């Protein structure tokens, strides 16, 4: 029987930093996932180095973000990628910089855990050089991202790399059974290579507070129903759909909408959305809040009557968990984890093939139902208690153990590193 020993984990998040500004173009649920998972693994004595090429904003190249967790910014000499996809062109150089770092630090890693396809390509290179297991979590899949009725947006380069990684990677983590089926049906993945491990929610941070007090703090003390959107402004997030539903909603309810996310006042996409708001005559009802620090999001969730997630595609849906953990119900598209925890409950509902009228009708029905029922936020919160990061970390560690521990010797390279350090 293997005895569990500490692992050294190389976690790759090349295009996005777990400390980036949430709601911006390259920073969303994946960043939260990487940070929370790394810290949970650290609590069990494992060491995690997270590697990124995302902008460092003048900080130190190595940032300690947990007891055994470091964020390491890799600088590529004389390279200026114009987009995240351009990072693929520089992966050999990035690989060399990462290898040099490991050599200088005298670290041998036990496992590579890649997040997103670009990191997966780098992880594949390192796997071949280091001869250690490589796990990938795609977080989103290119073939699934194009909104219905739109021309294909994702590049052939991405799709080709994803298909190759699916065929060659030792293990794939999918957050839901639905995403596992997407991998099997659209990418021909072998079912035995896929483990389902969901995303999680920080149940200490996201908790129930007084709605009245939350609204008072946010200076939104009216009795008007308050809807909330949290996320990036990418087309697949469905913000236009939500705005059009809000306009229709005024036939039955006057409701306001807070939108959290985006870059700044000069952001082109945000300007397009504001112009759409003006065309729909919703200027007094829609409030662009901008970016909100993750620690302050519970205030907004608690102030809202309803969180709306109108995405055409989500691989999981962390916003849904955060809202429910605050006792706030959710209306969402029938994507990601949402059908599993919303349908057939008092927590909200999902909409199949949503259009503005269907979404408006669902919001209207739920607002009416919420007012007529003896609504209990605690029962809503109870529905996501099994999604604690403690559980997600345990499931991930179990997967690591199955593929990284050498049962014949009972040692990992992490344990061998400690021996070498002691001998030195």
Image (cartoon, helix red, strand yellow):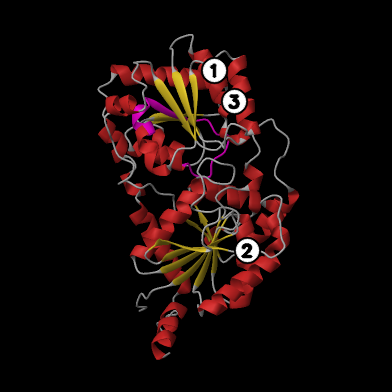
Query: What is the secondary structure assignment of the residue under circle 1?
Result: helix
Disc 2 crowd rating (10 Å Cα; few below 14, some 14-19, many 20+) is some
| Residue topped by disc 3 | 240
Q: Residue furthest front?
A: 58
Q: Are marks 1 and 2 in contact (CB under 8 Å)?
A: no
The image shows residue 198 at horizontal and vertical percentages of: 44, 50
Disc 1 crowd rating (10 Å Cα; few below 14, some 14-19, many 20+) is some
| Residue topped by disc 1 | 357
Which residue shows up at 37% across the image and 25% down it? 305
Mark number for residue 75? 2
- In which quadrant will I find the N terminus? bottom left
Dot 3 or dot 1: first in sequence order is 3
Numbered disc in front, either 2 or 3:
2
Distance from the alpha carbon under mark 2 to that under mark 3: 38 Å
Residue 267 position (above or below residue 408) = above
The image shows residue 65 at horizontal and vertical percentages of: 42, 59
Distance from the alpha carbon under mark 1 to that under mark 2: 49 Å
The image shows residue 308 at horizontal and vertical percentages of: 46, 29
Viewer-nearest residue: 400 or 35: 35
Task: Decide whether residue 360 is among the magenta residues.
Answer: no
The magenta span reads 300-317
In this rendering, does residue 395 appear at all? no
Query: What is the secondary structure assignment of the residue under circle 3?
Result: helix
Examine the image and state in which quarter residue 81 appears: bottom right
């Amino acid at each position: 029987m293997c005895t569990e020993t500490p692992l050294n984990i190389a976690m790759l998040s090349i295009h996005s930093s777990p400390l980036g500004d949430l709601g911006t173009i390259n920073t969303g649920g994946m960043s939260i996932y990487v940070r929370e998972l790394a810290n949970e693994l650290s609590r069990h004595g494992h060491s995690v180095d997270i590697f990124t090429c995302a902008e460092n904003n003048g900080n130190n190249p190595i940032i300690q973000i947990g007891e055994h967790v470091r964020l390491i910014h890799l600088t590529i000499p004389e390279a200026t990628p114009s987009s995240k996809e351009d990072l693929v062109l520089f992966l050999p150089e990035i690989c060399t910089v990462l290898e040099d770092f490991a050599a200088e630090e005298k670290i041998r890693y036990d496992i590579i855990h890649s997040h997103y396809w670009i990191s997966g390509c780098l992880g594949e290179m390192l796997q071949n050089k280091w001869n250690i297991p490589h796990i990938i979590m795609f977080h989103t899949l290119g073939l699934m991202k194009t909104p219905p009725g739109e021309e294909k947006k994702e590049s052939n380069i991405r799709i080709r790399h994803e298909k190759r990684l699916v065929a060659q990677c030792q293990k794939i983590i999918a957050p839901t059974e639905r995403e596992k089926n997407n991998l099997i049906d659209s990418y021909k993945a072998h079912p035995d290579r896929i483990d389902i491990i969901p995303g999680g929610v920080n149940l200490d941070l996201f908790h129930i507070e007084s709605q009245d007090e939350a609204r008072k703090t946010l200076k939104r003390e009216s009795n008007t129903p308050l809807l909330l959107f949290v996320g990036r402004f990418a087309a697949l997030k469905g913000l236009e759909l939500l705005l059009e539903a809000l306009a229709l909603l005024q036939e039955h309810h006057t409701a306001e909408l807070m939108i959290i996310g985006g870059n700044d006042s000069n952001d082109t996409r945000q300007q397009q959305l504001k112009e759409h708001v003006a065309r729909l005559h919703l200027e007094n009802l829609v409030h662009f809040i901008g970016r909100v620090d993750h620690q302050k999001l519970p205030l907004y969730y608690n102030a809202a009557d309803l969180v709306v997630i109108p995405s055409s595609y989500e691989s999981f849906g962390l916003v849904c968990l955060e809202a429910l953990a605050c006792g706030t119900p959710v209306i969402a598209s029938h994507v990601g984890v949402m059908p599993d925890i919303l349908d057939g409950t008092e927590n909200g509902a999902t909409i199949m093939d949503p259009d503005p009228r269907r979404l408006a009708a669902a919001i209207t029905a739920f607002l009416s139902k919420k007012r007529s029922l003896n609504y209990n936020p605690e029962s809503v919160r109870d529905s996501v208690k099994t999604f604690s990061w403690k559980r997600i970390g345990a499931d991930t560690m179990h997967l690591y153990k199955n593929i990284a521990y050498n049962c014949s010797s009972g040692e990992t390279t992490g344990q061998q590193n400690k021996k070498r350090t002691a001998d030195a």
